[in-house]
Image (tube, helix red, strand yellow):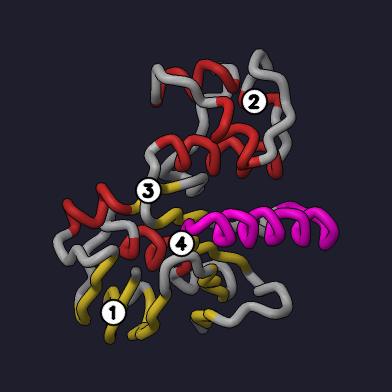
Amino acid sequence: MIVADGLSLEGVYPEVSFEAGKGSLTVVTGPAGSGRTSLLLTLAGRMKPTTGTLSVAGHTSPRAIRKAAALALVDGVTDLDRALTVKEHLRERRRRPYTTALETAGLTAGEGVRAGELDREQRVRLGLALALLDEPQVIVADNIDLGLTDGRCAVMWDLLRDLTAEGNTVVASAVEAPAGIGNLVELA
């Protein structure tokens, strides 16, 4: 599903090589400023690498990759409008039914709740629901562990594993990876 070979963005993240199959979870780790978000944006076709090659779902052009990969919550890129409700965010993206995406992402906040009232975990869940609406081949989610307790992080990692069990390929970033992750990309 994803093949990155010698992928780098000069001055942002070093050369990265990895493969991720369909239905897999890949975690990109590293401290703040290590280039995690930029790598995710590259994998989703939103940033052009300086070196290396990238194939996502058999596509190599950024335009085609953008169609195959959906961004969940990526701070500074897919920020939610604090004044809009959950329902307004979902309807803005798609007119057809969205209840399955909400259920899959495990968002229990009411549809009338404004995004500004959601806590970090609920915002990540809404971002995942929005990404699922695109029926992507790859879902990219940033900063999964940001501002969450260890227990809530574990719940979010379980959710991402559940998404992969349904055949979704997920690439997520965090400062630290949870135990048992087979596909790990570490940035210094």
Give the residue pinned by disc 4. Answer: 169
Chain part drawn in magenta? 147-169
In this rendering, the label closer to the viewer, 2 or 1: 1
Residue 120 picture location, percent across and down: 69, 42
Per the model, the C-alpha gap separating discs 2 and 1 is 36 Å
Q: Is residue 178 above or below residue 93?
A: below
Residue 172 picture location, percent across and down: 53, 62
Mark seen at residue 116: 2
SS of the residue under disc 3: loop
Nearer the observer, 58 or 126: 58
Identity of the residue drawn at 41% across and 62% down:
40
Kindly indicate the quadrant of the structure image that contains residue 45: bottom left
Per the model, the C-alpha gap separating discs 1 and 3 is 22 Å
Say which amino acid is labelled 4. Thr
Per the model, the C-alpha gap separating discs 3 and 2 is 26 Å
Identity of the residue drawn at 59% across and 22% down:
86
Give the residue pinned by disc 1. Answer: 7
Q: Is residue 38 left or right of residue 132?
A: left
